[in-house]
Amino acid sequence: AINQRSRSSDLSSSSSAERWSYPRRRTINQNKITMMGRRDMATAMAAIAFLAGASSRSGVGVAAAFVTQARGAAFANGAGVQTTTTSPVGTFGASTCESSNAASPLSRGGVRALNMVRNRGLEVRDEGATPLPGGMTLYIKAGPDGESVGDCPFAHYVRTVLHEKDLEYSLVPSTQSTKPQWLIDFYEGKMPALRHRRECYVESDVIAQYLDFFFQEPEMSGPTKKAQREAGEACDGFFPAVARYLKHTPDNDAEDVELRENLEEVLGKLEEHLGRDDRAGPYLAGDGETFTLVDASLAPKLLHMEVGLRNFKKGDGGGAMDDMVREKFPMVRAYMDAVFERPSFMEASYPEETILWGWGNARGD
C-alpha cells in the first residue's frame, strides 16, 4: 500500500496508457526555443552550477543534465530530439536505476539560453505558467514482483525530497517491459523519472534540484553554498566505494581487502566532517541543524551499505562487517541513526529483503 502522499496509479489499462504514453506534440518553433551553440552551452552550464550552488565536482553533471533536458525538451515538445544526460553516480546493480573554455559575450541565442537557465532548465511558455503542486508521476525501478517499490537508492532519495515537501505524486514502479514507451524513446528508459504534467526529468540530482527550486517549503539547499559544497565533498566517492565492495566476490581475498580499505578511507573522510567543532545538529551541512538535499541523497546509500555489510560481508574474525562502522566510525553511526529516523526517509523506504534481492542480483548470487 502506498502512503497518502503517494497515490497508487494504474496506468496499465488501455485508456490510461493511451492518455499517458505521449504528450501533446508541439514544435520547437511554437515554443520559441533556440538551440544553444557550444559557447552558449558552456555559459549556461556555468550559470546553472552557480544557481544550483553545487560543488565544482558534482555541479557539472547536474548542470549538463539541466541544460540538455531543457534544450532537447523531447518529452514535452515531441520534437524528436534525442535527450542524453550524465549520471553523477552511474548504474546501480543491473537495473536502469541511475547509475571549458572562457565564455565570450553572449549571442542572441545565448541570452535565450541564459533565460532558460534562470528558470532551472524549464522552457518559459508564452502564457508564463509556473510549475504548481499536483500532476506529478514518479517512475522508479520495480521490486522482485514487478509491481512493488524496488531497491534503487536514487529513487529513495527523490521520494524523500517529495515527502519532505509534502508533495503529492503518483508512484509507478516499472520493469524493462512495463516502462512507458516515451521514457524509452526520449530518455533511454532511465529511472527515476519525474513527470510533472508536460515536463519530465531524469537523474535524481536534477529532479531534487528542480523540486527544491520551485517548491521551497522547506528549503533543502543548505544554509550556505559553501556549507552545501563542503557536505557534498565529505561524501564524495562514497557510493561507488560501497558498490564495488558489496559486489565483489569472493570475500576476504586480496582484492576484497583492498576494496574494504578503500571504503574505510571514504568513511574516514565522512567521520572527520561529522566531527567538526562547529557542528551542533545531527546533519551534514553547516551547523548540522538543517536536513538538506545532501542528507536526503546520502541516507539511502548508507542504508544499502548497512544491509549489504550485515548480510554479505564478514570480517577477518567471521563477524558481520556492519560492526566495523560502529567500532571505527562512531560519528557516522550516530548520523545514520539520525537520518534513518527521519519521517520522510521512513515513508519512502522499502523492506530489507528488497535490498538483498538487488545486491544479490548484482553479486550474481
Image: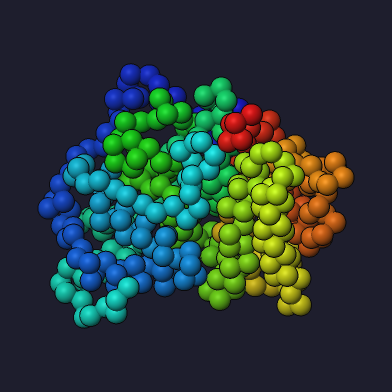
Horizontal placement of 183 versus 4: left or right? left
Residue lying at 29% horizontally and 79% vertically, measured from the top left: 102
Q: Determine which quarter of the picture holds residue 45.
A: bottom left
x and y percent of residue 284 in the render? 66, 65
Color scheme of the displayed model:
rainbow
Q: Nearer the viewer, residue 175 or 361?
A: 361
Q: Quadrant of the C terminus?
A: top right
Which residue is at the far top?
A: 14
Residue lying at 49% horizontally and 44% vertically, measured from the top left: 91
Q: Is residue 286 visible?
A: yes
x and y percent of residue 27 in the render? 15, 47
x and y percent of residue 77 in the render? 22, 45
Residue lying at 36% horizontally and 52% vertically, measured from the top left: 85
Q: Is residue 11 above or below residue 188?
A: above
Horizontal placement of 120 versus 81: left or right? right
Q: Is residue 208 above or below residue 19?
A: below
x and y percent of residue 322 in the render? 78, 47
Horizontal placement of 2 versus 136: left or right? right
Q: Is residue 207 visible?
A: no
Residue lying at 31% horizontally and 60% vertically, measured from the top left: 67
